[in-house]
Image (cartoon, rainbow, N blue to C red):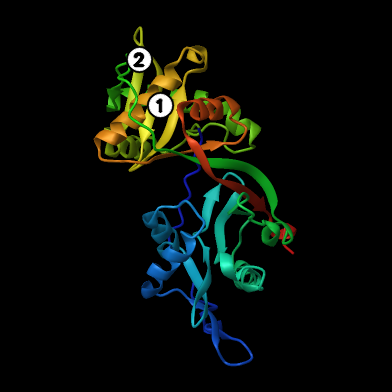
């Protein structure tokens, strides 16, 4: 399983905000900047056909420069995240969403043109976005404007009974396990990240901020459980609020049932915390993981494609 953590904190100039709101020929306001009281309508709109937690939608909207398309009621929104620094240079995530019953009416195009106009003021070398590709969704808005599909991931959920108690005994994360955790993460996902052209290949590359990373792991230590076999760390699970964030197994120990048992354990731990439905994401090419989750009774509920572009690609 692989997750891309998208952080979109707000850090944006107000240089072009005099353009808003935009109006159509009848004088009805169409595109304007997001206001806090828009949030309930946006959450309701997005949840019509996206498997996202309301808190995730709120974070994405509030931590970005966000616009809404309004014609008496909201029909769409777009978010442009903070410019971040990478080994390639400055990069940015963006997001455009139109209510399902108002698609193919040009709303997404208007929102895209708004985002594109603001991109001209940013010195970015790469742009990233996501969109749903199953359930009749059409990614044409992004592909026709120069975005290239990158890789796909499936959201799955489990609503079955608790699993039987497992034989393994993972232990909660401590600071002394830092090197083990980093090794398992890098080794466990190196092939997958390489196949998906995700850079850097190692999740924790040389030169990363070790102090910051250690603090993040300690802060989340109640959700991280490492599995040891004969004194060696062979795998771990990382839990979220109602989902399994990551399961990683040392490649030398794969095929011995540790992934299955860690999945059993993860579901049972979340159930102990009062979670009824357990979610996870799995990259499409991770065939072994998908087969495991299928065999355990997880059902696929959404497929999302990641796409990217350079400024020169945009049309």
The crowd level at tag 2 (other Cα within 10 Å; few <14, some 14-19, many 20+) is some
The image position of residue 101, as x and y in percent, is 57, 68
The image position of residue 174, as x and y in percent, is 27, 27
Q: Quadrant for residue 285, please give it.
A: top right
* Residue in the picture at 44% in, 21% down: 260
* Residue in the picture at 37% in, 37% down: 213
State the SS at label 1: helix
The crowd level at tag 1 (other Cα within 10 Å; few <14, some 14-19, many 20+) is many
Label 1, label 2: how many angstroms apart (C-alpha)? 16 Å
Q: Quadrant for residue 110, please give it.
A: bottom right
Please give the residue where the numbered disc 1 appears in the rendered image.
263
The number of discs equals: 2
Which dot, 1 or 2, sits closer to the camera? 1
User: Viewer-proximal residue, 195 or 302?
Assistant: 302
- The residue most toward the front is 161
The image position of residue 114, as x and y in percent, is 60, 73
* Residue in the picture at 45% in, 21% down: 259
Above-or-below relation of 170 to 99:
above
State the SS at label 2: strand
- The residue most toward the top is 230
Q: Is residue 44 left or right of residue 221?
A: right
User: Viewer-proximal residue, 296 or 10?
Assistant: 296
Point out the image quarter for the C terminus.
bottom right
The image position of residue 104, as x and y in percent, is 67, 69
Q: Is residue 62 left or right of residue 310?
A: left
Please give the residue where the numbered disc 2 appears in the rendered image.
228
Earlier in the chain: of badge 1 and badge 2, it is 2
Would residue 214 be seen by someone viewing this image from the given angle?
yes
């Amino acid at each position: 399983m692989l997750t891309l953590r998208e952080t979109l904190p707000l850090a944006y100039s107000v240089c072009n905000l005099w353009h808003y709101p935009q109006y159509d020929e009848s004088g009805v306001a169409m595109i304007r900047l997001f206001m806090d009281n828009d949030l309930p309508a946006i959450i309701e709109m997005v949840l019509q056909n996206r498997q996202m937690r309301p808190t995730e939608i709120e974070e994405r909207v509030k931590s970005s420069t966000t616009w809404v398309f309004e014609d008496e009621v909201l029909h769409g929104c777009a978010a442009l995240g903070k410019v971040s620094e990478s080994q390639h240079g400055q990069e940015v995530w963006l997001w455009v969403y139109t209510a399902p019953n108002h698609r193919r009416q040009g709303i997404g195009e208007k929102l895209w043109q708004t985002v594109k106009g603001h991109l001209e003021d940013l010195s970015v070398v790469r742009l990233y976005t996501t969109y749903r590709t199953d359930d009749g969704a059409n990614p044409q808005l992004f592909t026709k404007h120069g975005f290239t599909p990158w890789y796909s991931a499936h959201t799955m959920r489990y609503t079955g009974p608790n699993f039987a108690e497992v034989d393994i005994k993972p232990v909660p994360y401590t600071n002394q396990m830092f090197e083990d955790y980093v090794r398992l993460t890098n080794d466990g996902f190196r092939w997958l990240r390489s196949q998906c052209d995700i850079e850097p290949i190692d999740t924790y590359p040389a030169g990363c901020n070790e102090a910051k990373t250690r603090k993040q792991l300690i802060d989340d230590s109640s959700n991280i459980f490492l599995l040891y076999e004969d004194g060696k760390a062979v795998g771990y699970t990382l839990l979220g609020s109602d989902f399994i964030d990551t399961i990683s197994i040392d490649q030398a120990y794969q095929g011995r049932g540790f992934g299955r048992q860690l999945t059993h354990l993860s579901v049972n731990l979340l159930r102990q915390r009062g979670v009824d439905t357990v979610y996870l994401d799995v990259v499409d090419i991770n065939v072994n993981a998908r087969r495991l989750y299928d065999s355990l009774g997880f059902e696929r509920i959404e497929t999302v494609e990641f796409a990217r572009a350079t400024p020169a690609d945009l049309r």
